């Protein structure tokens, strides 16, 4: 019997998709997984500060068009590493959506050298330039229906062409 294993990039992106299902943001559900040496070292999703109310319960707290209650998934994952003393230098991050400018700066400052993302989302030109200047790379991952046919994504743009 022949068994085909899921590729690493899809495996880790799948973890990020699962994390996004924990999001408490009503505007966009995002998940992030930090990986070093093919091992998951942290994960995060966008939501409120621990102990605060959630947007899904009380609505977004919007200031200047942004919900200030929400901590982005990438920040939550990096802060988890900081909290538990886990090194992020030379790590990779898998994010369900292209990181915003502030998250991109944080990712690069944390020493993460490879950014994988699933969906385009306001891809910032300055963020892309910073990634290049830092000697980091960014790559879009498409999921294969072969491995994710049962997931309730409801969006064929996430998948590779058959």
Image: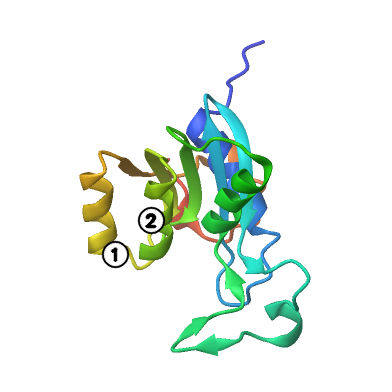
Relative horizontal placement of residue 147, taking residue 95 as reference (left or right) = right
Callout 1 secondary element: loop
Between the residue at mark 1 and the residue at mark 2, the CA separation in whole angstroms equals 9 Å
Relative horizontal placement of residue 82, taking residue 49 as reference (left or right) = left
The picture places residue 110, in percent across and down from the top left corner, at 44, 45
Q: Which of marks 1 and 2 is in front?
A: 2
Please name the residue that numbered disc 1 is placed on.
Answer: 124
Label disc, if present, on residue 104 of the rendered structure: 2
The picture places residue 37, in percent across and down from the top left corner, at 52, 24
Residue found 68% across the figure and 69% down from its top: 49
- Name the residue nearer the viewer: 134 or 32: 134
Marks counted in the figure total 2
Q: Please say if 158 is above or below 59.
A: above
Residue found 30% across the figure and 40% down from its top: 136
The picture places residue 109, in percent across and down from the top left corner, at 39, 48
Q: Please say if 83 is above or below 154.
A: above
Q: Do the residues labelled 1 and 2 touch (CB within 8 Å)?
A: yes
- Name the residue nearer the viewer: 155 or 48: 48
């Amino acid at each position: 019997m022949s068994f085909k294993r899921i590729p690493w990039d899809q495996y880790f992106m799948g973890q990020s998709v699962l994390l996004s299902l924990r999001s408490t943001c009503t505007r966009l559900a995002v998940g992030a997984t930090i990986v070093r040496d093919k091992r998951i070292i942290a994960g995060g999703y966008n939501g409120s500060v621990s102990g605060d109310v959630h947007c899904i319960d009380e609505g977004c707290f919007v200031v200047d068009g942004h919900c200030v209650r929400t901590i982005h998934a990438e920040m939550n994952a990096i802060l988890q590493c900081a909290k538990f003393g886990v090194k992020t230098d030379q790590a990779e991050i898998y994010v369900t959506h292209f990181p915003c400018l502030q998250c991109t700066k944080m990712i690069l400052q944390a020493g993460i050298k490879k950014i994988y993302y699933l969906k385009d989302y306001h891809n910032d030109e300055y963020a892309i330039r910073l990634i290049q200047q830092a000697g980091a790379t960014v790559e879009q991952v498409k999921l294969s229906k072969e491995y994710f046919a049962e997931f309730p994504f409801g969006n064929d743009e996430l998948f590779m062409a058959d």
